[in-house]
Amino acid sequence: MGRKGRDGPAGPYAYPDSWYTDVHTDLIALRRVWRQAGLRVLEQGDALARQAGVAAEPALLELDGQRISRVIVNDAAWWRADLVVAGTHGRQGIEHLRPGSVAEAVARTASRSVLLVRGGASRA
């Protein structure tokens, strides 16, 4: 019998031989689905920008273990972006102080100008 660790009880554990392979395959498939969905969103956004006469250079960024805000800030610097536009949830008051806001972290750490756009309620 093992002793309890930070992440739960320690061994002994028995997993089927295929456990790691199955989980790894599922994660690869999930990542592929997320990537395809992200590319569709970028295509839609690019089409809207073109309709509005705005030249955009959409890019799908991959995290590779980094914080989302750091990846965005680094990419904006690499592209020498004039402006970074980030959407927010529009929280106010105490909810605004909740940690984890990607848009807020980008605004705090970017060396470029940042425009925060508050998300609105969906319209019926």
Image (cartoon, rainbow, N blue to C red):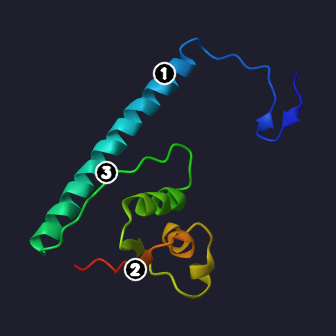
What secondary structure is marked by label 1?
helix
- Which residue does the image show at 74% across and 20% down from the upper left? 13
- Give the residue number, with chain letter if any, for mark 1: 22
Picture layout, residue 50 above or below residue 1: below
Residues at marks 2 and 1, CA–CA distance in whole angstroms: 42 Å
- Give the residue number, with chain letter if any, for mark 2: 115
- Which residue does the image show at 45% across and 81% down from the upper left? 90
Q: Sequence order check: which comes first, mark 2 or mark 1?
A: 1
Q: Nearer the viewer, residue 10 or 41?
A: 41
* Amino acid type at mark 1: Asp
Image mark for residue 38: 3
* Amino acid type at mark 2: Leu
What secondary structure is marked by label 3?
helix
Name the mark nearer the viewer: 2 or 3. 2
Outermost residue toward the top?
17
Q: Sequence order check: which comes first, mark 2 or mark 3?
A: 3
- Which residue does the image show at 40% across and 72% down from the upper left? 86
Task: Categorize mark 3 by other alpha carbons within 10 Å: few (<14), some (14-19), many (20+).
Answer: some
Q: Quadrant of residue 58?
A: bottom left
Q: Quadrant of the C terminus?
A: bottom left
- Which residue does the image show at 84% across and 37% down from the upper left? 5
Picture layout, residue 98 above or below residue 64: below
Q: In the rendered view, does 25 fall on the left or right side of 105?
A: left
What secondary structure is marked by label 2?
strand
Image mark for residue 71: none
